[in-house]
């Protein structure tokens, strides 16, 4: 017997006597349930065990007191029923986490005692005293083993820096899915998950196999524990573990059949599994079919419901559930099935459950068109348009949204297809009803009716356009629309598709009307003089000093540009290329021969638009009373003028391309100076910055390009969709730190790329959390929209670009810590041709006033090939090759495992008919080199090939291909005549050639580390010739760098830049219109930017043999 056990002789003496014992025992007999009863019981037991020694039981008494503070009064229980029961009547309101503890069978006292017992362990962990923490856990495990304590021990061991400990942890984690008795303690699973995160960063498949399976086994063992199931479901969604999430959602539906939401959780997750490419095709098809079958049953139950306001549990209840039905049916069913649902009174857009969901109306109109049910489409749209202009019982126009353009478009389309005069008359009547002055529909909706009248007039059918060849019919309609809605910034976009359909005579007449100011009058800008300080604007300047009148003139100028420049250019060349060809054709405006771009049309238009812009912009933002986020109303004029100047530079592409004073570069510098002046008073205009980024990139001015990019102020997803504007090929343009301005210190390219990659990593968790919230709130359509975003972000052009460019810059910066470039943001095996790659880049935000039958201006103004799937895949394969040749760890021997994997699975380079369409000339040389290197490695390091006939000639051919590509690279460098200042194409050629030469030397060095018996003898001799060429390229690039540095150290560059804008041949007069003082300041920044580019060239070093 312990010395502290109470003996009979001690009874009635000391602190523990019959009286105190009865005091504690009485708590068990209370008719009220005391949440702290468990703490009291344990205190009682402790006192019994220790002979009434309160010191030994201090923890229990403290827990009891803490519990009492949390639970100020008890609540009533059903009389005579022991244990924790759901109360009939609460004496006070419980907090959610307190109720959760009661329902889970764990009292607040349990949790408090446990927390107090764990406190020393967590204190030791926070102090990184893992040895002490393990000692405390082992002590508790010896007394009372539990899954929680075992998991806590593994968690502590995982935080140890010792490799042996982490290996042991991983081995323990591997055993979790194999347990005979699954884990049912959720806290233990979460600790294992934390431990997993310490020893296995990121890999999703391992998490699914270990933690995901443990969570599913936990749910399987305790299916009635709703809270545990939901938490495990959420965790699986967060890790994109759709398979286990599917099983858990199925368990929730079966375990809680009266919960309507779980029915759709299960269907949505089965369908989510079916559209996830990471699972086997057979099982995806199986679960997709099951999801389709289940939701069809629910739809059938909804259709047959007697009362749509009292629907059965297993039916469709909400608009989001209807959208899920259509999404699944669209993927796995037929259009006719969807249309059947949309036509049903209980499932269609006018049903009770639809709640006026506009998306359902869109579905119906689109599907009716797809199945060519023209009569029903006509009747439906006619009814909607009538409802749009009809007041409801309260006298309000509550359904004006039915005047949406998709309704008008479908209305006219169906009427055209039905081919009857009565249908034309119905359309005309509806247009007139909307345009009736008595119709109170808002002007923005009436605009759709006016545009519908334009569309009718241009309809190419006998019924709708009886005199389609007559300008008397169509021109007045265009002009009428302009007069009605010319103040809207969208008027040009509205009319562009129809103006393109005009014949040559109609276009010429419309151009004459617009040029002679026959629609909106003369703006009066040609006689503009700056008002004196304090002087009011003269009445004759009202044409361009009021926002509405200026908008009218801008729309007129856009149409003039379309008629005189864009459409004739596109007709002269069905798809005009970046450089005009030799073919001549009559000019539309001046009846003179010209090539694709007409210099006279473009030059005069640029000057005229610039004059109107400068007159309208005089006085800055203050004269227009603009908010900080407002664009200047005249901005589109300066963009039009810049567009013309850029096209003029394309005409001048032949000849002395690299001379600062050449006509080509003069036009470019005029455009830049004009855009900079506009940007100074309209910083929120992103289109100006897009143009400046592109032009500064061409000029090789990284600092000013970054300044323009910084002013875009990209946020969130824009870091993916718009980063290409500057950072595509940044490693061969400006890999070093951007210079600082007085206002802002710009990031280095690496920091910007890391910021972009942070978006991809953060978006996974954010999207996963939003996916869970979508389930929680029944927003099922959002689940699949988020999935589409996730899939695109994992394999977007820009995501791959960030990895490739980051790796290339890291190779240029030897002081940088070793980095893999961020491959973790990409899908597994991104270089595989089976891996999907998406173009998420935003090209639509670029300014564009071109016609739609040819290239957009974004395409026309490209100085280098745009991002493409071919180049993206080629970069990934090339980097895979360089990982073998240039491993992140410096060793004297070859990584045999990597080499073996490389030889076992040859790299597959993507193929296209003409690579030069997608690559610059230096990139194409590099491509040929990498393909040759891959072929050489596979041939020279595979002894099984050596005995084949013509092996040596084949190997020599590969080496010859490599040397020819290097010679081509050398010739490209020699062909660059004017190096100073170094424009973008010069920098690109130098950086690309130098990096390629270093990679060739790494290839030679790699082969030198391979034992002689494992490499074909002839290859070592071939490597000597290859190495000599690579070293020659390095010397040539360094020689060019020296020339550029010396040239930029000279003076006079600011004057030369200004002369290029104002005084060079072909200056065109635009430069003479701009403010000289502002231009001089800009020219100084331009030259400093060029000099800053020389710093980056200093990263290129010589490599001695």
Image (spheres, rainbow, N blue to C red):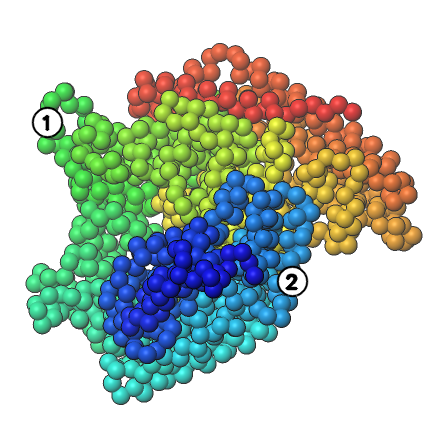
Marker disc for residue 115: none
Residue that numbered label 1 is attached to: 536
Q: Is residue 452 above or below residue 760?
A: below
Task: Give how far apart the Cα atoms at labels 2 and 1 are.
Answer: 84 Å
Residue shown at 39%/41% (left/top)? 714
Query: Where is residue 404 drawn, in percent x and y?
Result: 25, 63
Measuring from the top left, give residue 87's x and y in whole percent: 29, 73
Q: Residue at coordinates 52% horizontally, 67% vertically from top-left? A: 184
Does residue 530 show up?
yes
User: Going 51% across and 56% down the picture, which residue do you hit?
Assistant: 4
Residue 953 screen position, x and y as percent: 87, 46
SS state under label 1: loop
Q: Which mark is residue 175?
A: 2
- SS under mark 2: helix
Q: Is residue 187 visible?
A: no
Q: Residues within 10 Å of mark 2 (few under 14, many from 20)?
A: few
Q: Position of residue 699 (x, y in %)?
A: 49, 28
**Residue 28 sits in which quadrant?**
bottom left
The one nearer the camera, 309 or 376, is 309
């Amino acid at each position: 017997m312990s010395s502290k056990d109470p003996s009979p002789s001690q009874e009635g003496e000391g602190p523990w006597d019959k009286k105190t014992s009865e005091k504690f025992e009485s708590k068990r007999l209370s008719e009220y349930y005391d949440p702290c009863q468990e703490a009291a019981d344990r205190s009682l037991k402790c006192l019994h065990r220790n002979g009434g020694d309160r010191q030994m039981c201090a923890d229990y008494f403290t827990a009891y007191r803490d519990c009492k503070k949390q639970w100020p009064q008890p609540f009533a229980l059903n009389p005579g029923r022991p244990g924790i029961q759901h109360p009939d009547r609460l004496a006070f309101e419980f907090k959610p986490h307190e109720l959760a503890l009661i329902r889970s069978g764990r009292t607040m006292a349990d949790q408090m005692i446990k927390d107090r017992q764990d406190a020393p362990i967590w204190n030791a962990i926070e102090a990184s005293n893992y040895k002490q923490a393990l000692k405390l856990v082992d002590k508790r495990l010896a007394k009372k083993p539990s899954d929680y304590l075992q998991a806590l021990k593994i968690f502590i061991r995982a935080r140890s820096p010792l490799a042996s400990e982490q290996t042991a942890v991983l081995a323990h984690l591997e055993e979790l899915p194999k347990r005979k008795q699954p884990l049912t303690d959720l806290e233990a699973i979460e600790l294992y998950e934390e431990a997993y995160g310490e020893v296995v960063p990121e890999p999703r498949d391992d998490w699914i196999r270990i933690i995901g399976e443990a969570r599913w086994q936990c749910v399987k063992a305790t299916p009635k524990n709703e809270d545990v199931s939901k938490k495990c479901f959420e965790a699986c969604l967060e890790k994109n573990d759709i398979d286990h999430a599917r099983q858990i959602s199925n368990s929730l539906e079966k375990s809680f059949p009266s919960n309507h939401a779980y029915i759709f959780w299960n269907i949505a997750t089965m369908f989510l599994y079916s559209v996830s490419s990471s699972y086997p095709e057979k099982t995806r098809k199986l679960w997709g079919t099951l999801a389709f079958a289940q939701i069809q049953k629910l739809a059938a139950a909804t259709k047959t419901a007697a009362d749509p306001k009292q629907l059965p549990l297993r039916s469709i209840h909400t608009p989001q559930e209807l959208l899920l039905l259509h999404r699944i049916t669209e993927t796995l069913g037929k259009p006719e099935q969807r249309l059947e649902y949309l036509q049903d009174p209980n499932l269609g857009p006018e049903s009770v459950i639809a709640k006026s969901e506009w998306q359902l109306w869109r579905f119906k109109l689109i599907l009716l068109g797809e199945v060519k049910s023209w009569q029903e489409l006509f009747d439906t749209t006619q009814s909607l348009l009538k409802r749009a202009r009809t007041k409801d019982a309260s006298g309000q126009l509550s359904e004006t949204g039915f005047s949406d353009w998709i309704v008008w478009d479908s209305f006219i389309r169906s009427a055209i297809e039905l081919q009857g005069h009565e249908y034309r008359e119905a359309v005309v009547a509806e247009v007139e009803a909307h345009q009736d002055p008595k119709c109170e529909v808002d002007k923005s909706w009436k605009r759709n009716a006016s545009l519908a009248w334009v569309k009718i007039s241009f309809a190419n059918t006998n019924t709708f356009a009886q005199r389609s060849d007559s300008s008397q019919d169509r021109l007045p309609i265009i002009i009428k629309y302009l007069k009605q809605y010319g103040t809207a910034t969208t008027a040009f976009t509205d009319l562009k598709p129809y103006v393109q359909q005009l014949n040559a005579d109609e276009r010429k007449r419309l151009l004459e009307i617009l040029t002679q100011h026959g629609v909106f009058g003369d703006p009066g800008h040609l006689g503009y003089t700056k008002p004196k300080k304090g002087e009011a604007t003269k009445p004759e300047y009202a044409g361009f000093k009021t926002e509405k009148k200026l908008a009218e003139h801008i729309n007129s100028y856009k149409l003039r540009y379309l008629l005189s420049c864009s459409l004739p250019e596109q007709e002269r060349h069905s798809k005009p290329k970046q450089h005009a060809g030799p073919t001549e054709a009559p000019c539309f405006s001046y009846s003179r021969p010209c090539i694709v771009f007409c210099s006279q049309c473009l030059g005069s238009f640029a000057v005229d638009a610039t004059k109107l812009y400068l007159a309208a912009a005089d006085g800055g933002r203050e004269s227009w009373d603009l908010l900080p986020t407002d664009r200047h109303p005249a901005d589109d004029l300066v963009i039009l003028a810049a567009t013309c100047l850029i096209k003029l530079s394309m005409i001048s592409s032949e000849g002395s391309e690299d001379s600062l004073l050449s006509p080509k570069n003069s036009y470019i510098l005029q455009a830049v100076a004009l855009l900079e002046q506009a940007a100074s008073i309209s910083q929120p205009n992103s289109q100006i910055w897009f143009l400046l980024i592109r032009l500064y990139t061409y000029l090789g001015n990284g600092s000013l390009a970054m300044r323009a990019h910084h002013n875009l102020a990209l946020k969130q997803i824009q870091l993916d969709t718009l980063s290409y504007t500057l950072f595509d090929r940044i490693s061969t343009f400006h890999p070093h730190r951007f210079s600082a301005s007085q206002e802002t210190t710009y990031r280095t390219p690496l920091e910007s790329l890391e910021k972009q990659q942070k978006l991809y990593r953060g978006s996974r968790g954010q999207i996963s959390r939003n996916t869970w919230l979508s389930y929680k709130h029944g927003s099922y359509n959002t689940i699949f929209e988020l999935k589409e975003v996730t899939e695109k972000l994992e394999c977007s052009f820009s995501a791959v670009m960030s990895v490739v460019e980051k790796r290339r810059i890291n190779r240029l910066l030897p002081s940088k810590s070793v980095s893999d470039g961020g491959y973790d943001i990409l899908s597994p095996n991104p270089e595989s041709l089976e891996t999907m790659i998406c173009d998420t880049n935003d090209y639509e935000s670029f300014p564009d006033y071109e016609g739609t039958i040819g290239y957009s201006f974004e395409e026309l103004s490209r100085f280098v090939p745009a991002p493409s799937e071919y180049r993206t895949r080629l970069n990934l394969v090339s980097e895979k090759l360089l990982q073998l040749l240039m491993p992140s760890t410096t060793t004297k021997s070859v990584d045999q495992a990597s080499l073996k994997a490389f030889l076992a699975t040859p790299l597959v380079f993507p193929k296209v008919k003409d690579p030069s369409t997608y690559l610059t000339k230096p990139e194409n040389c590099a491509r040929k080199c990498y393909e040759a290197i891959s072929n050489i490695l596979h041939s020279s390091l595979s002894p099984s090939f050596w005995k084949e006939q013509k092996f040596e000639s084949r190997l020599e051919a590969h080496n010859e291909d490599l040397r020819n590509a290097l010679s081509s690279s050398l010739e490209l460098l020699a062909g660059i005549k004017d190096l100073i200042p170094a424009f973008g194409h010069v920098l690109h050629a130098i950086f690309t050639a130098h990096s390629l030469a270093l990679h060739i030397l790494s290839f030679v060095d790699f082969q030198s580390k391979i034992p002689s018996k494992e490499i074909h003898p002839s290859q070592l001799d071939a490597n000597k010739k290859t190495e000599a060429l690579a070293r020659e390229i390095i010397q040539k690039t360094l020689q060019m760098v020296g020339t550029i540095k010396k040239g930029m150290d000279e003076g006079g560059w600011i004057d030369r830049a200004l002369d290029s804008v104002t005084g060079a041949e072909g200056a065109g007069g635009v430069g003479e219109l701009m403010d000289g003082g502002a231009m001089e300041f800009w020219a100084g920044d331009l030259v400093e930017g060029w000099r800053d580019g020389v710093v980056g060239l200093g990263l290129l070093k010589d490599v001695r043999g």
